[in-house]
């Protein structure tokens, strides 16, 4: 999502599907480059925002919790995004 006025909002997606959005994978040109090189995006750019979001989604779907390490992850936990809250709610409902 690029936060453009013509895009469908997360809220609209959730209301239409009647399901929470668990992840928003940010656009990254390196994703296309890794595809062209036939390698995993997560392997090629393991610390990118997109890779971390993929890892969080995968962990949630497997019933695990993914917590990235590092300085920025500390501040990320102080103000969780809507999809982080949705992942936690999903985890609680499915695996607790």
Image (cartoon, rainbow, N blue to C red):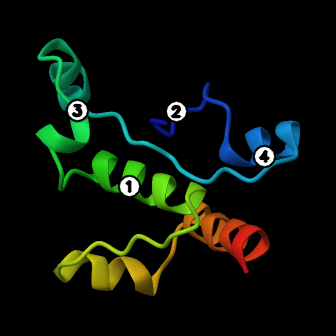
Residue neighbourhood size for the residue with mark 3, other residues' Cα within 10 Å, grouped as few (<14), some (14–19), many (≥20): some
Residue neighbourhood size for the residue with mark 2, other residues' Cα within 10 Å, grouped as few (<14), some (14–19), many (≥20): few
Number of the label disc, if any, that sits on residue 55: 1
Residue neighbourhood size for the residue with mark 4, other residues' Cα within 10 Å, grouped as few (<14), some (14–19), many (≥20): few
Quarter of the image for the C terminus: give it: bottom right
Mark 3 vs 2, N-terminal side:
2
Q: Residue at x 88, y 46 (%)?
A: 18
Left or right: residue 27 versus residue 65 is left
Q: CA distance from mark 3 to mark 2?
A: 28 Å
Disc 2 to disc 1: CB gap under 8 Å: no
* Residue that badge 4 annotates: 14
Left or right: residue 60 versus residue 40 is right
Where disc 2 sits, the SS reads loop
Nearer to us of marks 2 and 1 is 1
Mark 1 vs 3, N-terminal side:
3
Nearer to us of marks 3 and 2 is 3
Q: CA distance from mark 1 to mark 4?
A: 21 Å
């Amino acid at each position: 999502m690029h936060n453009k006025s013509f895009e469908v909002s997360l809220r609209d997606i959730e209301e239409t599907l009647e399901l929470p959005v668990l992840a928003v994978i940010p656009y990254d040109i390196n994703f296309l480059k890794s595809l062209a090189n036939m390698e995993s995006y997560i392997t090629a750019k393991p610390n990118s925002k997109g890779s971390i979001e993929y890892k969080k989604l995968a962990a949630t779907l497997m019933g695990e919790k993914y917590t990235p390490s590092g300085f920025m992850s500390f501040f990320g936990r102080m103000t969780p995004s809507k999809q982080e809250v949705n992942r936690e709610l999903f985890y609680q409902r499915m695996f607790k």
